[in-house]
Amino acid sequence: MRRMRKKNHFGDKEFDQAYFTGKSSCGYPGGYTKENLRCYDYDYTDFSDVARKISGLGIKTYFEIGCACGYLMEELLKLSIKVKGWDISKFITEKALPEVRPFIEVKSIDEIGSLPDKSFDLVHVSNVLGYVPFDKLDYYLNQIARVAKKYVIVYAGTPEDAPEENEIRKINKPDEWWNKKFAKYFKLVDMDWYLWKPK
C-alpha cells in the first residue's frame, strides 16, 4: 500500500493562480485586486495612506517579504522611497505594474540570511510567518530584526481573522501568542498598524 505524502503548502502551487484568483478554498475570494482587497477590509489595503505613514517615519529604504504584486511598493515609489520585494509566487509577481516589477524577486523568506545587517530602514513581513515551519520561526524573527535598521511591520495571520487558511497555515495561534513572540525580538511602537522596532 502506497503511503500518502503530506503536502507542503509553503512555496508550492497553493500560493499561485488558484490562491490569488479565489478559485481555491483558501486565499482571496474574488481575487487579489486593489478593489477586492478593500471590499473585504483586509489590513493595509489603503495603500496610499499606509505609504504616507511609512514616509512620515523618515523611511528611505523599504523591504517587503510577501509583497505579492507590490501594491504598497507602487505607492512608496511615488514618495521616492527605495523598495525591494520578495514573494514566493511567480504567478502574482508577474501581475506587478511595469514600474514596480524590477524591484520584485521570486524568493522565499528562507533566503533572508543572505542579506547584510541593517539593510533596510523598514522590513515588512505580513501574512507570511504563519506558513513557516514552527521550528524555524525564531530564526526568521531573528533575521528580520537583524536586517531592519529602524522599524519592522510584522503580522502573521490568525485562525480568528482567516479561518479559511487554517488548513494550509503551519502555525495557528491567536494574536496574543504572536505578540508575545514578536516582543522577544522587537519593541512595540504602534499596534494599530503592527509597527515595531528591532531590539
Image (cartoon, helix red, strand yellow):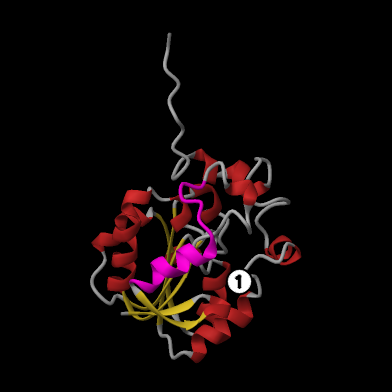
Quadrant housing residue 120? bottom left
Q: Is residue 107 left or right of residue 162?
A: left
> In this orientation, which residue lies closer to the viewer: 140 or 100?
140
Q: Is residue 129 left or right of residue 53?
A: left
> In this orientation, which residue lies closer to the viewer: 120 or 177?
177
Residue at the (44%, 51%) spot, across then down:
88
Query: Is residue 79 something that shows in the picture?
Result: no
Question: Residue 145: x and y, percent?
Answer: 32, 72
Position above or below: 39 against 151: above
Q: Quadrant of the C terminus?
A: bottom left
Mark 1, residues whose alpha carbon is within 10 Å: few (<14), some, or many (≥20)? some
Residue at the (62%, 57%) spot, across then down:
160
Give SS at disc 1: loop
> In this orientation, which residue lies closer to the viewer: 89 or 143?
143
Question: Residue 50: x and y, percent?
Answer: 58, 79
Total marks placed: 1
Query: Is residue 129 something that shows in the picture?
Result: yes
The region drawn magenta spans: 169-184
Quadrant housing residue 124? bottom left
The residue type indicated by label 1 comes to Tyr
Position above or below: 137 against 51: above
Q: Is residue 37 magenta?
A: no
Question: Residue 80: x and y, percent?
Answer: 48, 84
Residue at the (47%, 63%) spot, across then down:
177
Q: Quadrant of the N terminus?
A: top left
**Residue at the disc numbered 1:** 44
Q: Is residue 172 magenta?
A: yes
Question: Residue 158: x and y, percent?
Answer: 56, 57
State the residue lying farthest toward the top.
1
